[in-house]
Amino acid sequence: MDDNAPPHRGRIVTARLQEVGVPHMVWPSMSPDLNPIEHVWDQLKQRLDDRTPPPRDLAELRVALVEECNALPQDNIKRLVRSMRRRCQAVIAANDWAHPSGTYTFNKTCV
């Protein structure tokens, strides 16, 4: 599964996925409710934003990213993964295939 972002749809990537037999699944972009990693990225960004002092250069940013990634509570990540059934059910239950929050819409073919 990918979110159809340009890096995921490049010719080289597409060719390699076809070569190894990975089918392309229709999946809407901007669908964080069905893509828990987006919430993990948000948590990581917040942790980086809260650092005092903030990273001053690329080297410090790399160190900070590793530290904050390692410090992310695994319970948060497990909770996101466990919530996928509920998230999918909410999308399926929506008559217009929009998440109940009204923020994101989804293709019927992706669920």
Image (cartoon, rainbow, N blue to C red):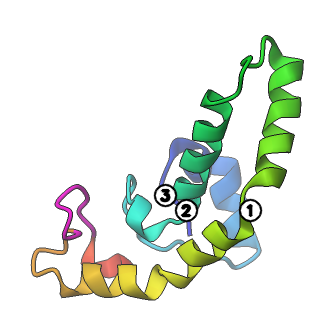
Report the predominant secondary structure element of the magenta stretch.
loop
Write down the region rendered in magenta.
99-106
x then y, percent, for residue 77:
64, 69
Image: 61 above or below 4: above
Closer to the eye: label 1 or 2: 2
Q: Which mark is residue 89?
A: none
> Which residue position holds label 1?
16
Say what amino acid the circle numbered 1 marks: Arg
Asked whether 75 or 111 is in front, the reply is: 75
Instruction: Find the residue positioned furthest to the left.
Output: 95
Q: Earlier in the sequence, mark 1 or mark 2?
A: 2
Say what amino acid the circle numbered 2 marks: Asp
Asked whether disc 3 touches disc 1, contact meaning CB atoms under 8 Å apart, the reply is no
Give the CA separation, mark 3 to mark 2.
Answer: 4 Å
Q: Secondary structure at mark 1?
A: helix
Asked whether 76 or 7 is in front, the reply is: 76
Q: Which mark is residue 2?
A: 2
Q: Which mark is residue 3?
A: 3
Q: Residues within 10 Å of mark 1 (few under 14, many from 20)?
A: few
The structure residue drawn at horizontal position 52% and vertical position 56%, both measured from the top left corner, is: 39
Residue 40 painted magenta: no
Image: 85 above or below 49: below
x then y, percent, for residue 110:
37, 77
